[in-house]
Image: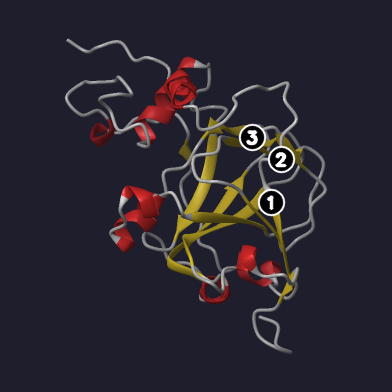
Amino acid sequence: MRREFKSLLEYKKSKKDWHYNPSKKSKDCKYVGRIMNFNFSTVKEKLERKNEETSTELYKEDLKNGILIPTQLDPESKAASKLDHIKHGYNEHNSRYIQWIDNRDKLPKEFDELKNISGLDYVTIACFKQNPGNTNPWHFDGYGGVKKKGNLSDANAKKIKRYLLFLEDWHWGHIIQVGNNILSQWKAGEIYTWSYGMYHLSANCGIYPKWTCQITGLPTKKALHLNKKKKFYIRKNKKL
């Protein structure tokens, strides 16, 4: 008999890894800087059309032995997040997105340049397109690709950083929320990051698709968020 799923969010609150108070003012994400010469308009044309995914679709591999309790189901699994989304009222009609992942899909070679300057080890990269009317609901990331690639211990896994790179200038209705911080009016090339396990969301309530890039890995001494400079260049005097 399938056991009742208890809220992943409540399970996370019990870990006391953040204050979980929507009324509290807190600094939950960090501005890293801006990549000045990545011409996404030319790269966009190279991306292949893909079928949309959703934030609520449960796969067979998600449901192990019918156990849907966060303490027995891996709390960092996609299934745990998806079950919370369903519980909160999201469905396949309002949580759609298209995502290209470097270890699964063919990404334009220009994205390798972003990986090269990131200063991250075991780095993975993904490109994310969100059409108007869709939300990637309140969730946190487990960074499974980097963990597997680096065979990282739990302690080292918590050091993983994700850089959120905006591929186009902000437009009306494009929203990113990290913890209690809401981002808007960004410029193409700007990068933000946040602590491991931090809840965040992405929504497009606007009129144009929202394009972002995720660069994830284990920081080295050359990691961009440790760099005092705020402007970064892929190749000197050469635009892609």
- Element at label 2: loop
Residue 156 figure quarter: bottom left
Q: From mark 1 to mark 2, how far is it between C-alphas?
A: 8 Å
Asked if the residues shown at circle 1 and circle 3 are in contact, with their CB atoms under 8 angstroms apart, the answer is no
Looking at the figure, which quarter contains the C terminus? bottom right
The amino acid type of the residue labelled 3 equals: Gly
Q: Is residue 10 above or below residue 208?
A: above
Left or right side of 56 for 21: right
Q: Which residue corresponds to the image point at 49% horizontal and 40% vertical from the top-left?
A: 197
Q: From mark 1 to mark 3, how far is it between C-alphas?
A: 11 Å
Residue 208 figure quarter: top right
Marks 3, 2: nearer the viewer: 2
Mark 1: few/some/many CA within 10 Å (<14, 14-19, 20+): some
| Residue 27, label in figure | 2
| Residue 87, label in figure | none
Asked if the residues shown at circle 1 and circle 2 are in contact, with their CB atoms under 8 angstroms apart, the answer is yes
Asked if the residues shown at circle 3 and circle 2 are in contact, with their CB atoms under 8 angstroms apart, the answer is no
- Element at label 1: strand
The numbered mark, 3 or 2, whose residue comes first in the sequence reads 2
> Looking at this view, is 207 or 122 the one in front?
122
Left or right side of 77 for 118: right
| Residue 30, label in figure | 1
Mark 3 sits on what residue? Answer: 179
The numbered mark, 1 or 3, whose residue comes first in the sequence reads 1
Could you say where residue 25 lies in the image, as x and y percent from the top left? 75, 30
Mark 2: few/some/many CA within 10 Å (<14, 14-19, 20+): few
- Element at label 3: loop
